Every structure is written in C-alpha cells, then in structure tokens.
Image (cartoon, rainbow, N blue to C red):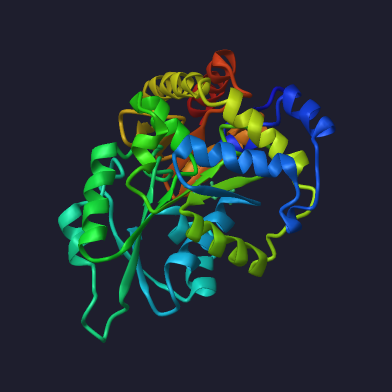
C-alpha cells in the first residue's frame, strides 16, 4: 500500500549522507566533553545562531525543560501561549519537573500574542502570585499552523522582558522554517532571546537531537541540568554527525516543504468539510477544521489512515498535516485524491 505520512516532520528519515557520516564519525565520551563531532556540531550551531555557546541534547522537550530550569526557580511563574508546546504536549513536565507555574494567554488565530495582555500578566511584587521570571515564545507556532514570529515582534517581547528583568526563551523547534519563510537570517530571530532551542530531528531530518544555545554561563548550567535529567550520553558523535549534515544541507530545502504545504492547503480548501486555520499557510504545517454531519474528524483520520494516508486529529473537529522531505508534490496530490474520495463516499 502507498503510504503518505503527514502526521509530522519528525517522520522524515535520515538521508543517505547521514547514514554514511554516522559510520565514519570520529567519536569520544561526550560525558567528558571528548566527543569531537559533538563539539564541532555545538560550535557550528552556536555560530549559526550567533550565541556564545550551544549544547546537543536528546530532544526538544528536554532542551526546553533545561532552559526553563536554568532561567527559573521552583515557585516562579513563566508566561507563554496557552497552546504552546511546553504547556500542551510535554506530559505536564514543565510544572512537574521545574516547579514553575505556567501563566498563559491566548494567542490570536495566527499565533500572535497581544503584547499589552502579555505585559499585564507579569507579576513581580504581589506575594500571592508566582513571581514571573521567564517568557517562552514559540517560533514557528506549531498548533497555530506553523505561523512565524517576526524579528520585530521578538524584539518587542524582549523589550517587555527586559523592562521587568525577565528572561526570554525561544522554543524554536522549527526556527529555520521561520527564517526561510521570512527570508531573514536566523540570527534576526534569535538575537533578542536569552536562549534558543531548535530541533535537528524535524524538518532537518536528523534521527535524534536538538540544540540549546545561549551565553557561556547559561550553557555551563544547562550541562548540569542535562546530566540531572539523565540526558548525558556517550559516543554522541554518530548522532551529531547527522546534525552537522542537517545544518549544512537541509536548511535551504525547507522552502520545498513550504511550497508543498501551500499546495496541500489549496487542495484541502476545495474539499467539502475542510477549512484551513489560519487560511494562509506560511511554513510546513497545515492546521484544519473538519466538519461534516456524517463524518467526524477522528473518523476521517481513521478512514484515510486505513488507506495509507496518515494525518493527526488534535481536537474533536481540528487536525494537522505536516510536510517534510520524504513527501513530494505527487504524494500530496495522492493524499488529496484519497481525502476527496473519502469525503464523497461518506
Ligand atoms: C514547538 C515544539 N517544541 C518542542 C518540541 C519537542 O521536540 P521533541 O519531539 O524533540 O521532544 C516539538 C515537537 O514536536 C515542537 O513542535
């Protein structure tokens, strides 16, 4: 059966070059800081984001967790969008493992935060409420449909953070998608953030791993937290070698995924029951509402799944599709055909 997997860009498999560099990677014990390939990846990543230092971590989830731990202490408050990944899809780890209280606001339909509302949530003096110490921004915004945050917006949010002595952490799991869509150097998006996490294992196709970056002092403390969380690894060079390929070869091609996502959204908009949310697709994520009297979103997803087209249902009538390097235009057209037939048959 032909498979078209639109559940996430995490399903993209390592490239042939990645398989080769894994085999040849120079390795050592990263626990002693002696893995030359990991050290090279960290140096490259820091350079790319124009940060003093960087750290290779097993996952984006752990990267965000480490950053939050470094920037806060138990009892502090952190502010983020209600739908932010750190608030919705991490098995509750933010509160459970960092001891922070998450104070949320609702981003608008396109994932943008209202800055007045954001500022109004900050608490420094009222002893009844958590003391705010951190703002976490997500770029691209996953559950808002892969929408981007601009350099100007980031800078405005940073100004607010600075005004109150807070830190700003960027969950940039897909920060290169954002930079490519906006046609800006990624540094424009990371300059005004105290720390950044980005994933190598999503659109950049590495099998494992994420990077966190910030000042030397931040990374020194982050290394301790990584160890504390059991994230210390050994001959990580075989993974870091793939990360290097991700940074060298997989960034510019992300625009193909964006084109395919726009093509997908256009096709979906012509099928009964679908509305694209938000209407304009910017990067590689297409969120949609699916409403038909005879077929729920969940039933639709199960039905097309049996035909080999995999999609995620996030809520009752809300779902997500993500494009990535292992899907081409023909795959997208095939998926659209399957969707059309499924809707007609119901
Ligand atoms: C915005 C965002 N942040 C963080 C993560 C976590 O990354 P990982 O799956 O590597 O833990 C994800 C994963 O989908 C994500 O979409």
In the displayed structure, 182 sits above or below 62; it is above
52 left or right, relative to 206: left
Residue at the spot 63% in from the left edge and 35% down from the top edge: 305
Residue at the spot 59% in from the left edge and 66% down from the top edge: 225
Residue farthest to the right?
23
In the displayed structure, 61 sits above or below 25; it is below
Residue farthest to the left?
116
190 left or right, relative to 154: right
194 left or right, relative to 36: left
Q: Quadrant of residue 312?
A: top right
Task: Residue 231 in the image: state x and y as whole percent.
Answer: 68, 60
Residue at the spot 28% in from the left edge and 56% down from the top edge: 106
As rendered, which of 328 and 318 lies closer to the eye? 328
In the displayed structure, 92 sits above or below 265; it is below
Task: Residue 60 in the image: state x and y as whole percent.
Answer: 56, 50
Residue farthest to the bottom?
127
Examine the rendering and report whether any part of residue 283 can be seen.
Answer: yes
Task: Residue 293 in the image: state x and y as whole percent.
Answer: 40, 40
């Amino acid at each position: 059966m032909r498979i078209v997997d639109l559940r996430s860009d995490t399903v993209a498999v390592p490239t042939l070059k990645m398989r080769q560099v894994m085999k040849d990677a120079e390795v050592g014990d990263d626990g002693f800081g002696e893995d030359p390939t990991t050290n090279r990846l960290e140096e490259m990543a820091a350079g790319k984001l124009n940060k003093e230092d960087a750290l290779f971590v097993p996952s984006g989830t752990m990267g965000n967790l480490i950053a939050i731990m470094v920037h806060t202490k138990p009892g502090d408050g952190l502010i983020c969008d209600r739908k932010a990944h750190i608030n919705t899809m991490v098995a509750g780890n933010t509160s459970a493992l960092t001891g922070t209280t998450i104070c949320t606001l609702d981003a608008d339909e396109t994932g943008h935060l209202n800055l007045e509302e954001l500022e109004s949530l900050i608490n420094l003096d009222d002893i009844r409420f958590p003391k705010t110490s951190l703002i976490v921004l997500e770029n691209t915004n996953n559950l808002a449909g892969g929408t981007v945050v601009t350099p100007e917006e980031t800078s405005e949010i940073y100004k607010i953070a600075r005004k109150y002595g807070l830190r700003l952490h960027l969950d940039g799991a897909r920060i290169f998608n954002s930079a490519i869509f906006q046609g800006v150097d990624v540094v424009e998006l990371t300059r005004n953030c105290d720390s950044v996490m980005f994933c190598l294992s999503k659109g950049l196709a590495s099998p494992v791993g994420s990077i966190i970056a910030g000042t030397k002092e931040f990374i020194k403390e982050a290394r301790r937290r990584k160890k504390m969380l059991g994230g210390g690894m050994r001959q990580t060079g075989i993974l870091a070698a793939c990360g290097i390929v991700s940074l060298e070869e997989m960034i510019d091609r992300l625009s193909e995924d964006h084109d395919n996502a726009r093509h997908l959204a256009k096709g979906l908009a012509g099928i009964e029951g679908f509305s694209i949310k938000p209407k304009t697709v910017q990067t590689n994520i297409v969120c949609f509402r699916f409403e038909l009297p005879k077929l729920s979103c969940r039933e639709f997803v199960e039905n097309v799944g049996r035909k080999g087209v995999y999609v995620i249902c996030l809520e009752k009538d809300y779902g997500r599709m993500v494009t990535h390097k292992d899907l081409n235009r023909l795959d997208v057209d095939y998926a659209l055909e399957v969707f059309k037939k499924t809707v007609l048959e119901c």
